[in-house]
Amino acid sequence: MNRVHEVAVLAVDNVVGFELGLPHKLLGGATDAAERPLYRVRVCTLDGEPVRTSAGYRILPDHDGSILATADTVVVPGTTDHQALRDGTVEPALARALTGSNARIMSICTGAFVLAAAGLLDGRRASTHWMFARRFRTLFPAVELDPDVLFVDDGDVLTSAGNAAGIDLCLHVVRRDHGVEVANRSARRAVVAAWRDGGQAQFIERPLPASDSSGTAPTRAWALARLDTPLTLTDLAEHAMTSVRTFTRRFREETGMSPNRWLVQQRVERARRLLETTDLPVDRIAADSGFGTTASLRQHLHSAIGLSPLAYRRIYRGADPVPAG
C-alpha cells in the first residue's frame, strides 16, 4: 500500500466554518477497495492558537503551521474578514509558510485571496466566489481570474469558487489522485453529487427536473440513450411533439441552456467516463459519445477541461493510455 497522503488544512482568522470541514469529509473519507484511508487530514493555524470562524465560534486546532512543511497538499478554506480581502496582503510569516511548501496548494472560495496575497497565483488562472471577483481583480491584477467556473486546476495550485464548489474541488482531487470509483465512493458517503464539471460554466451539470407530459425531461432521457447517434434540434422537438421554437424555449427554462449545448455537455461527460473506466481506443470513444471523430472529441474535451483525450486518460487513470485505433 502506498503511503497515506498528508493534507494540512490552514485556518486563518474568520475562516468559513462550512469550508473548514470539507477536506476532512471528502478527502478524509476517501478509501481504497479495502476501506483503508487514502488521506490523513489535519487542521492547523499558523501559530497553533484558536481562530474565529464565520459561524460565531472559535476552533482550537491540534497543530500549528509546522505541518505545512511536510504536507503533500495544503488547503486554505475561505475567510469572511481577513487582511487579504481588505488590502491584498498577508503577514510575512503566512506568506513564507505557503510559498516555502512543496505541497500541492488548494483554496476554497475566498481562500484564493490568501494564495494571491502570498504571490502564489501571479500569472496563473484562478477562481473565487463571483461576488468577490471585482475586488479580487482590483487587488491582484496579475492573476487571470475566471469567476464563472466551479474550480480551476492549474496543476500544483487549484482554486475553487464559493462554498459548495469546495465539494467539487475536493472530489476532483480525489478523482485525479485515485480515479472515478474512489471519488464516487467518497461522494456517496457524504451524500453529495459525485460530478459537477469544473470547466467552462456551460458545462456545469444541472439536475434534471421531474418528468411531466409537457416538459422536456422525457426527451432528454430519450436523447441520453442515443448519444452515439446524430441528433438534431428537429429530432428532439419531434420526439417532444412540439415545434422547434417551443421546445427550445421550454428546454432553456428547465435546464438553463440550449439543447445543443446540453447535448455537447452530455457527450463530453460520457467520453470522460469512458476514458476513465474503459480501455477503449479514443476513436471508439469518440463514436460512442457521439462526436464521430477523434478530432471532434479532442476539440470539445479541450474546450471543456483543457486536456486532450490521451492526457485526460493519463491523469485520471495513472496508466499509459491505449493508442487510438
Image (tube, rainbow, N blue to C red):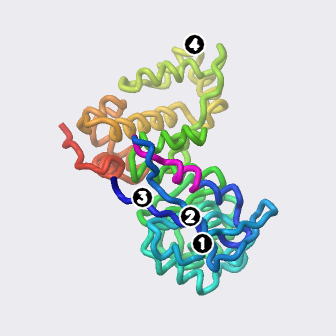
Visible in this render: residue 289?
A: yes
Reading the image, the residue beneath label 1 is 63
Residue at screen point 57% across, 74% down: 116
What amino acid is labelled 1 in the image? His
Reading the image, the residue beneath label 2 is 42
Q: CA distance from mark 2 to mark 3?
A: 13 Å
Q: CA distance from mark 3 to mark 1?
A: 18 Å
Q: Secondary structure beneath disc 4? A: loop
Question: What label does residue 4 carry, if any?
Answer: 3
Label 4 vs 3, first from the N-terminus: 3
Give yes or no for contact between labels 1 and 2 (Cβ–Cβ under 8 Å): yes
What amino acid is labelled 2 in the image? Arg
Label 3 vs 1, first from the N-terminus: 3
Instruction: For marks 4 and 2, give the one nearer the viewer.
Output: 2
Q: Which residues are magenta?
A: 23-33
Residue at screen point 49% across, 67% down: 105
Visible in this render: residue 203?
A: no
Q: In the depicted view, which residue is nearer to us: 225 or 64?
A: 64
- Residue 67 appears left or right of 163: left
Q: CA distance from mark 4 to mark 3?
A: 55 Å
Q: Does the magenta-highlighted stretch encompass residue 303?
A: no
